[in-house]
Amino acid sequence: MDYPMKYTICGFSQEKLFEYQLDINDAMILRWLIDFAATGKMKKLIENNLIYYLVNYEAIICAFPIMGITSTKAIANRFEKYVKAGLLLKTVKKGGSFSGTATLFSITSLVGDMIYDNEKPQTKAEISISDKNQTSSRNEEKLSASVSDKNQTSYRDKNQTSSRTGIKLPVALKNSSVNSSAINSSSSSAPPGGSEEAQLTKILNYYVDSHVFSDDFIPSLVSKLREFEIQPAEYQQFVDFAYTECNKKVKDKSRLMAYMYNSICDNYFISQYLQNKRSEIERQENLEKQMIICPVCGTKHYFSESCSCGLVHYKNPLEVEFFKKIYQLPKKQREQLEKEIEQITLSGGLNFDPSSISKLKKQKELVYQKYIAIPHEEYTKLFG
């Protein structure tokens, strides 16, 4: 009799754990890191658009005596393994707001890829790893139904957790700076009070009907974005990213709003946005390094591409000045010059004897003199 493999270990795809040569202890450690980061209680550092978390190895040992690991060095070695695998990024800081030497880690998108896709119906029971998560899953289904019926009733409790493979995704954050009057507002159809909230609501409503969300959703999200130094000017970029990422994860599109509601206030999700932003900045910087300035027209373009001015690039100062004069001609004159030069070239055919070549050069010189008044000596230096 064939027995099926369990799909998930601590919410991670067992297949992915195998791929990265991780064991069940690694799954527990990574789950601890993600869940603890989601609470907002870990000390963190934002650097180069990445969120780094201060990890206390002793806390992991105390959290999981069942692992049988008693050495912080053993935990540190496992974190080094995660860094080498690309699951985490590492930075070390001395002094400042940290006492002594602090080792911090940033969670990469590869960890998100390991989280099991809970869209498969046959695995929902497996990925609901606690009664609280099962309750949250039922609430998520309610929200999805509410969206379909255009029902604007809010029913999500402020301290509820998400069902997404056991990761806690608080919508109304426990450490949020949102005031109680905003959280306890009874009118879900009323526009948010602050300008940042109004701006975010308008952007969200382009993709979803945010009125079906709980009253504290927009204020909590604004507070969270502010905490991670995401400015209002970036709200459109963040929401675009959120919609795109959530759309990838959800196969049943009727649950898209529910998935966004459960996800985008989470530390882990926001860290993915910042990491994506950093990657895009690096990509643009690399592209910028491949750009050159045309010495003739002064425009920028990639080294491997021809310039929009259509003229050949030269480094010789005489050649650059020659083509600058051509470029500065009125468009019609430049086109006429190029046409006359082309006709002379075609008239020579494949005749390469010295006298024919000399005759063609003389004819071209007369054309250039007519349009850009190039002296004979300069022409001779350029074309012999």
Image (spheres, rainbow, N blue to C red):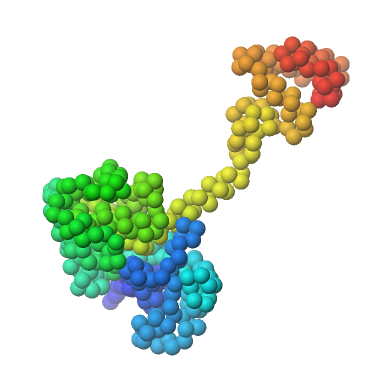
Query: 101 or 23: nearer the eye?
Result: 101
Residue 378 lies, with reference to residue 112, above or below; the image says above
Query: Taking 58 as reference, is 93 left or right?
Result: right
Compared with 311, 81 (above or below) is: below
Please provide percent x and percent y for residue 216.
22, 57
Query: For the point 17% across and 47% down, which residue is it?
Result: 190
Quick check: 110 above or below 294? below
Image quadrant in which you'd find residue 307: top right
Note whether residue 120 is visible.
no
The residue positioned 61% from the left and 14% from the top of the image is 332
Report how many numbered discs are placed on residues in the image.
0
User: In terms of depth relative to the viewer, which is nearer, 309 or 237?
Assistant: 237
- Asked where in the image residue 311 lies, by quadrant, the reply is top right
Query: In the rendering, at what x and y percent does residue 162 appear?
Result: 25, 64
Quadrant in the picture for the N terminus: bottom left
Across and down, in percent, residue 376 comes to 84, 17
Q: Residue at x 41, y 70 (%)?
A: 43
